[in-house]
Image: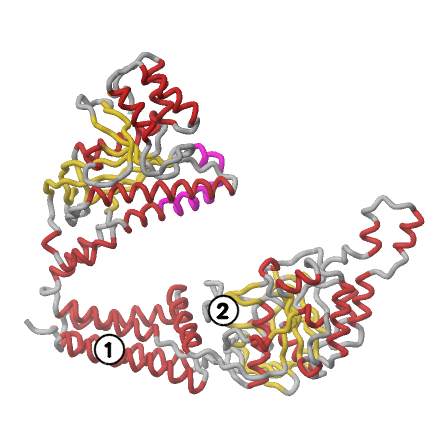
Amino acid sequence: MKPFSKFGPGLLAPFIAVVCCIVLFWIEPLPLTLLRNGVFDQFQRWRPRPYQAAPVRIVDVDEESLKKLGQWPWPRTRMAELVDVLNRSGAAAIGLDIVFAEPDRTSPRAVSSLWPLPDAMHSRLAGLPDHDDVFAAALEGKAVVLGFAAGPKDPAYGPPTGLFRVVFSGPAPYPFLHAFDGAVTSLPLLERKAAGNGALTFVPDSDGVVRRIPLLIGLAGRVMPSFAAETLRVAQGERNYIVKTSLRKDAGVLEIRIGGVTVPTTSRGEMWIYYTPAVPARSLPAWRVFAGEVPREDLEGRIVLVGASAQGLMDLRFSPLGNIIPGIEVHAQALEQIFTGTYLARPSWSHGIEGLLLAAGGLAVGTLALATPVLVSAGITAALLFAAGGGAWSAFIRHGLLLDPVTPGLVLLVAFILGSIVRHRTSEKRQRWVREAFSRYVSPNRVDYLVRHPDQLELGGKRRECSFVFTDLAGFTALIEQMDPAAAVSILNAYLDRMVRIAFDHGGTLDRIVGDSVAIMFSAPVIQPDHRARALACALDMHAFAESYAAEMAARGFAFGSTRIGVHTGEVIVGNFGGEAMFDYRALGDAVNTAARLESVNRHLGTRICVSEATLSGCPGAAARPVGLLVMKGKKTPLKVYEPITGKKQDAAAPACDLDYEEAFRLLQKQDLRAEEAFAKLASERPQDALAAFHLKRLQTGARGDTILFDEK
């Protein structure tokens, strides 16, 4: 067979793949962007920026500072004291990563209005200095930068003020900048006294990671600086921002000059952040500053940023290094990069290089996959993938360039796969069939075994002894009617996810999920000689999780309900049932129905788990107590059923056995009249023992013996 025909579909396969991928490359869908960003993040994890001493320090409002100095927010008088201390220590600029949007509620006048004091005392307190006035006086004449939070327009706040000026070199950059309609600002009194005012707002990517920080933003038709940029401007005593934009249409911002520093940016005026790992030397706890324990040389001539790392203050961000850092640290790391000249860049020509590699490499690999043996084409494809990845890595560590190896790599893989499929479609037919068959099995922990032993997978059905675990969640329907549907779905999905994972951990196969019910089978499709023990252990673990999850939900105010479980073993027919278009792997037989019935009888018995003797017989050493001979609706033959002893039987003391119950049950079996007295004693001693109460009620209504008839499911 020829590898391909000149005008056949095989020759078109690589071309089609490359064209489709080029379209995706230019569209940049979200999944592709996430993959690319993930690679850039991994580069930073492998080679984070080494910390270099820079004139930047963080005064950190950490957990210890809150313990020593009091809860947040601190009075403005304390903030004034902090500004004075930092100014006396010679800080070049002080950046406050805090929005002082409301008057200080701890001011004497504000506090006294809440107290039932004599008029004279009110007058005296009203005459004391207002905390905001004290803070404003502390700001005046000092190199202090405040922050504002850009966002939707809020009529309660006016536009932020500023003493800067933006000069354009080229077309106006406003169309390219991140734009906002309004901002939450500090009090006008404070803004007038501050030397600068910058945007604290980050613009994280869709996955929440902060990879870039805008140096300028658009705000209601104006260009405003970021907090980091404004602090740098004030530290240099400069007034102007010089924005260089490209003369080419839609090219955007090229660089931003702040005083004597020129910062390369993205087309949107952003700076890529090259993160370092946590560095203790970067931060100074606020309490040490107040205590005078910070040497003057640690602050003199430095930009000092005041912000919070305490978790309760919620100023935390995701970084590419895979950790969560305070927002103030992002600003600090940006300033460190500017001072050390350590930049990351994704240059405008990177798209051209990546597109060329995508097109040329995809066509070459697709053609080779059609024309050469699979090992040869695979080797060449691997070499090209390694070259793309290695080249991107080399550009990163040598020049700080962010080149995308993901998209070209995906194109190479797609072209190779398509070409290989066309060339080897006959030999691959059975393998594709196996993959498609495996995709219909829900239990992933059995897939590897089936791949190695395909003879274990048969179409049709066969008789086999299996064990089954059926669960149902009582009371959840009523809870759904009282809750927000989205919250109810989230709670239920978390519950079902853990229940199914427990089943997979024990080697079970998911038969089906119906609403809040789960059906698990063991010993299919792969034979498991210990399937009875697996099923019982699975049921016990499910019960333990369900109890803990219900308690967790109860603590959150949700009456989640209890989980009932039935376990049974018997012969069934297992296999693929359905048609050519779609089929389902499952078990059919009386054992399946019996397991489901055992689950449902729990609500009559008051138990949580019912396990049949057929299952318990294969679980040596299992602790359980007899329930009785149950004759369920539609059945004539009684089934011997037990309740496992879980070790947490409310008032029951012994986890391994229940001698008092078993003695009472033996009297019940013998139809001894003393059985009622024995169960009455148990019910009195154990008010939470539902099974003992069930038997007592039967005896009190005249029932005898351990055979129990159920007229309903």
- Disc 2: which residue: 319
Does residue 481 show up magenta in the picture?
yes
290 vs 372, nearest the viewer: 290
**Residue 674 as seen in the image, left or right of residue 157:** left
Q: Which class describes the residues within 10 Å of circle 1: few (<14), some (14-19), or many (20+)? A: some
**Residue 286 as seen in the image, left or right of residue 640:** right
199 vs 82, nearest the viewer: 82
Instruction: Tell me which residue sits at (22%, 35%) in the image.
Output: 568
Q: Is residue 545 above or below residue 707?
A: below
Q: Position of residue 690 (x, y in %)?
A: 38, 27
Q: Position of residue 260 (x, y in %)?
A: 64, 87
- Disc 1: which residue: 382
Q: Which residues are magenta?
A: 476-496
Image quarter hosting the C terminus? top left
Q: How is the image coloured?
A: secondary structure
Three-letter code, disc 1: Ala
Q: Position of residue 286 (x, y in %)?
A: 67, 69
Residue 690 can be seen, yes or no: yes
**Residue 121 as seen in the image, left or right of residue 581:** right
Residue 250 can be seen, yes or no: no
Q: Earlier in the sequence, mark 1 or mark 2?
A: 2
Tell me where residue 333 sits by quadrant: bottom right
